[in-house]
Image (tube, rainbow, N blue to C red):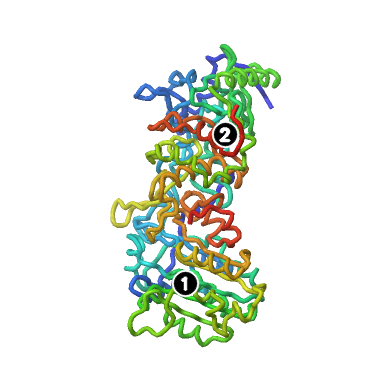
Amino acid sequence: MHTYQISKNQLNQLLEPYLQVGAHLIAPSLNSLGQVSYNKIQNINEIALNTCIPLKPPKSYLFPESSTLVQFDEKNPHLLESDASHSIQKQMIFGLRPCDLSAIAYLDAFFTSNISDHDYAQRRENTLIVGIACEYPSNACFCTSMGIEPGNCANADIFVVPQGQEYLIEGLTVKGQEYLATLSKDWKEISPELITGRKNEITEQSSSKLIEHIDLSKIRGRLNEIYASDFWNKYSEACIACGACTFDCPTCSCFDVNDTLKSSTVGCRYRSWDSCSFGDFTLHASGHNPRSSKLHRLRQRIMHKYHYTVEKMDLWSCTGCGRCIRVCPVGINTRSILKDAKEALGEPNN
Amino acid sequence: MNQTTNPYLPSYAQIIQTKEENSTIKSFLLELPETIAQELIMPGQFFQLSIPGYGEAPISVSEINEKTLLFCVANMGSFTQKIHTLGVGDKIGLRGPYGNGFPISASTNSNLVLLAGGIGLVPLRSVVSYFFHHQDNFKNLEILYGAKSSNDIIYRDDIKQWRHKSNTIFKLTIDKPEKDWNGNTGFVTQFLNPTTSDPSEVLFHLDKNFSQTKIFVVGPPMMLNSVYQALAAINFPAEHVFVSLENRMKCGIGKCGHCNAGSQYVCLDGPVFSWKTLQSMPNEY
């Protein structure tokens, strides 16, 4: 494995091939509202790395808000022509912190297990993921509680580690290494120990900036014990079921499927993001609704992230990115829910 | 990640026969598309039926034949209403089969008791037809069917035949009897009561210790709760009871999240679950 050291103004050498026609470069940059978000950029100078993670997660570049599943053929309305693959372009997503890299690792496992989701798999296949160590945690962040190190993550094709006026770069996957090999560059090769040392340093510094670390090891796999507990009430009463926490969550992946017609014979079947917070999410055709109350639905969201996916996939489906805390309009704090859950399970918070 | 085929792309099947089963349920006999292998379809599985521009819905298969599949669709919303307008010669999109189906091969040499509430008879009908095609593999069949009223009874022609089959018991009850009704009245769970059972019954006379009987249950959530109570009262083993759930679904392949209950996806891990598994799952179905 090759590891390199470059000066920060050499970053364009890493990214520039994706600014060419036919490929997209996605990176954190200022949007028209002056907020940092993951955008398709035209110029490397647009990249904004010296802030906390964008409020919107990068998932929409792999699992768009809305995407076509099948199209109806005009000449023969009863035969559905194939898929939307023609519109899937090569892209690099640059600047993902370890929390968002872990979220993509979760989405990969979820979408490609059992019956693989063709649309997701194709987008993923055409995407190069370039991560960066996180030096800027927000007040809402709690990644270390979810077992994520701010300075290090293996779930990227290429990982970039800032060091003063330089970047240390390593290719982690075959895809990442192959890409690095194609670049015409005069980068300085360094020993892997140097990059490991800097990653540990960033992990230590950024972890110390986090407002809190919640030790969840004692309650992993035990949330079912408080399924029927009263403590959900405290949060579900405040919840307005707006679904913002699910849309801004980097791992939430529920969707609805609908048809639309442009004319009597031309149209498509498409999916669009849905939310388990919504009242009709589980509504049966008969009118019966197994999760009819906000308590049921808030509990489902928490149980799913911190218990069901642990049972099913041995993975938390939370990365501690804190976006749900930042976006909630009524101030529901996921960290408080976790701490209350610990208490309800008889585990002290310290 | 390898390139995969698009799992959302349906095949198309021609309707070769239709029948109004009652005022809201219509059955469609479809020509089995070449893209779907008949031998891979099991009773209790479902397909996503679709019409371009109108949507998709998960529908249980009611009969699996060499060259045809039978589906029965209740008119419950805009999509199923559109399906009801289709007739012989029209085409329906379908993808599947999905789900696990009933544990048929694990039930050989057993008695099968089918407990159906309302349109719950639709998925169980695939088990009935499988039983008659493979009768040597099983002991006896008992079909216990509860309908709301006599107008709601489906498969009337089939029922006439079932009543005369060997090793087969068919019992029917309705909740809201009309004046001229002289059959059983009340809920279908009455047939699980040993004190009111008749001498022909599989459950209490042919397999007194329940070791050689499997019960397959499909019905509305309210019914399931009373079935559990009735089965608990006779100490029927939970691992021999299989329930098919009808959670809302959109994708059918474990991705959209709608049917998720606990760590299970009803479309992928079910729709058939043993009562024992259901006891460890949240009651969100």
Q: What element carries label 1?
A: helix
**The one of B55 and B200 positioned closer to us in this rendering:** B200
**Relative to A184, residue B83 above or below:** below
Query: Residue B147's spot in the image, x, y percent?
Result: 41, 74
Q: Which of A344 and B28 is in front in this view?
A: A344
Q: In this view, does A295 lie to the left or right of A145?
A: left
Please tell me which residue lies in front, A32 or A293.
Answer: A293
Left or right of A277? Residue A98 is right
Of badges 1 and 2, nearer the viewer stands: 1
Q: Please name the residue that numbered disc 1 is placed on.
A: B121
Identity of the residue drawn at 57% across and 42% down: A223
Res A122 label: none
Which residue is drawn at the image coordinates 52% and 14% (left, top)? A9
The subunit carrying tag 2 is A
Count of number-bearing discs: 2
Judge whether B243 appears above or below B188 on screen.
Answer: above
Residue where numbered disc 2 is placed: A102
Q: Is mark 2 on a helix, strand or loop?
A: helix
Image coordinates for residue B204, horizontal then vertical, percent? 60, 78
**In the image, residue A42 lies at what x, y percent?**
42, 25
Quick check: B185 above or below A200?
below
Q: Disc 1 marks which amino acid?
A: Leu
| Mark 1 vs mark 2, CA separation in Å | 45 Å
Quadrant in the rendering for residue B167: bottom right
Residue B166 visible to an observer of this rendering:
yes
Report the amino acid beneath label 2: Ser
Estimate how packed mark 2 is, as few (under 14), some (14 to 19) or many (20 or more) residues with alpha carbons within 10 Å: many
